[in-house]
Amino acid sequence: MRIGIDAMGGDRAPVEEAKGALAARMLLGKEDRIVLIGREPAIREQLRHAADWRDFIEIRHAEQVILMDDPPVEALRTKLDSSITVMARMQKEGLIDACISAGNTGACVAAATMHLRRLRGVHRPGIAVVVPTLSGPVALCDVGANVDCRPQHLHQYGVMASVYANVVCGVQNPRVALLNIGAEDAKGNELVKRTRQLLKEDPGVRFVGNVESRDLFRGVCDVVVCEGFVGNVVLKLIEGMAEGVIRTMVEELTRSAPSQLDAIKETARSIMMKFDFNEYGGAPLLGVDGICIICHGASDYRGFKNAIGVAMDFSKHHVNERITQLLSHHQGLVNG
Amino acid sequence: MRIGIDAMGGDRAPVEEAKGALAARMLLGKEDRIVLIGREPAIREQLRHAADWRDFIEIRHAEQVILMDDPPVEALRTKLDSSITVMARMQKEGLIDACISAGNTGACVAAATMHLRRLRGVHRPGIAVVVPTLSGPVALCDVGANVDCRPQHLHQYGVMASVYANVVCGVQNPRVALLNIGAEDAKGNELVKRTRQLLKEDPGVRFVGNVESRDLFRGVCDVVVCEGFVGNVVLKLIEGMAEGVIRTMVEELTRSAPSQLDAIKETARSIMMKFDFNEYGGAPLLGVDGICIICHGASDYRGFKNAIGVAMDFSKHHVNERITQLLSHHQGLVNG
């Protein structure tokens, strides 16, 4: 398998991207290769201390960089030699089998959708993030690819994220819940009410009903379906809350129980780990005809290394084939 | 001032409602009265130990109760003698000056909108919650009154919540932010993009731009504007996260630093207090021509007592008059 990494995407690019590629060596088989895409001199500089990087890493030069605040569609049109654009084209042409980027999410989604196209039967791709919660991982889809969702999109996120949760979290027959503002059928806006109906009617989805955000952490479901705006807000709130609450607790305990500073810090560290996105690698853009993994902008080398692992699992377990199969089966049922 | 409380609304009704009314005595002036509305025998039973309750509490019997999962509009139509309906009618008729309920939020909003009507110039009422964060309170509006928001509604939430934050949090000229999924202008869905424009153009609002959910806790704004579905998700997620993270931390520390159990529990308790909705009392439904305070279903007596305080502040500081004034001033500007 040949895995492309946008070496210019993350906050510290290309430092963590190159380190992540080096660290991923242990995951690779004999035929596997990592292709770092971006400014060759800068990338080469990061690899120079690893004598044998050429054994499993290649560099593909791309001159331009799409910045975090570039408007995605315009950036893709004007920066034809950007790492994101070059990478998406390479996968389209079969030169790589997967794309990984910690750069501008909108541009990654647009590039993948444009070059790879959607899987047969998929209305809109969605990003599925495995959210680390204290009672285990939950796959949340969508977290920002699609801020103009229709019920059909959300229904398909339930189907696609089920396949993904099965592969990545190892859950047999994942429980799918719909994020809503109340447990009852009548609650919510039109979008969730109509989505609820579609999820209920699909025998291929193990739909367990609505879930409120306060219950996301109670182990009541494995997959949570929501529209991209809401999902993005949830994801970032979890990040901010975990950090804020734990930091405050450490500060106060440092005053009230100073003799236990080491135990307190160690505990805080281990809890923060449970919320650490780097541990889970990247989030796949589900529904495109290829493999596109999106990483947090602040990813360190572990984030990239684990994203490579996610891409390999995605391929090995034939996630896309299974999604297509499930969707066409459902389409068959609907058409009668 | 005469303050009505729906005695049948909360999870432990009428126990906490009655206790809260008794505890609020210290807040009341000589002429102030609390009217508990609901099943008289049950309410009377809760008051029987307080010899002097008749000095400041009255009971108004209402036979029916709207349940948490009753569909709001239908419930209002069929349960004409429910505590929520009776209370709203009483305020309309001038028998009370404020309504407080921990019951079915949808029914409270519908009853208040129907009987009290909207303030002049207001498109849609919205619920403003003072969210306790570690860097101080932030007023979030709307958190669930309106799940079908237009840009004009959100703009007015900014105006109304500014007045409220000024009164309740004592912030001069509150900083208003728009909850979005990125800091840049181009980010978000159509609703937030158009709202952003309206907030920018209103000289009566101190608009500070977009805020991401992860930054809600960094003291960058005093008011956050969002549509009701998103706001409700945010509110409940904060509640769930705070509880989950703190509980886990206490559990782990109890193992790793058992000698400090008291200090750890005390610290956890004091941090939980900062997130305790009971400390902040209820959330006003801004934009109705009256005073309607909505409490958390799990409110204890402190929640009701503090809601009574909120209602009194609301009246004393002429929140509604100031909202009408600001909106008509803005309308004048728009019309040229």
Image: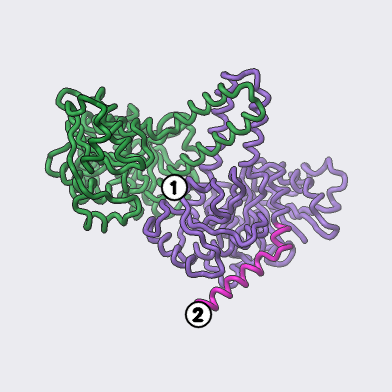
Chain colours: A green, B purple
Parent chain of label 1: A
**Bounds of the magenta span?**
B311-336
Q: Measured from the top left, where is residue A223 in percent x and y?
A: 38, 37
Does residue A217 appear anywhere in the picture? yes
Q: Quadrant of residue A291?
A: top left
Q: Going by the image, does A134 lie left or right of A78?
A: right
Tell me the residue at 49%/41% (across/down): A240
Q: Is residue B9 magenta?
A: no
**What kind of secondary structure does the magenta stretch mostly adopt?**
helix
**Label pair 2/1, CB-CB below 8 angstroms:** no
Residue bearing mark 1? A233
Residue bearing mark 2? B335
Mark 2 vs mark 1, CA separation in Å: 35 Å
Tell me the residue at 55%/65% (across/down): B205
A63 and B188: which is toward the camera = A63
Q: Measured from the top left, where is residue A213 in percent x and y?
A: 48, 42
- Is residue B216 depicted above or below A134 in this figure? below
Q: Measured from the top left, where is residue B48 in percent x and y?
A: 82, 42
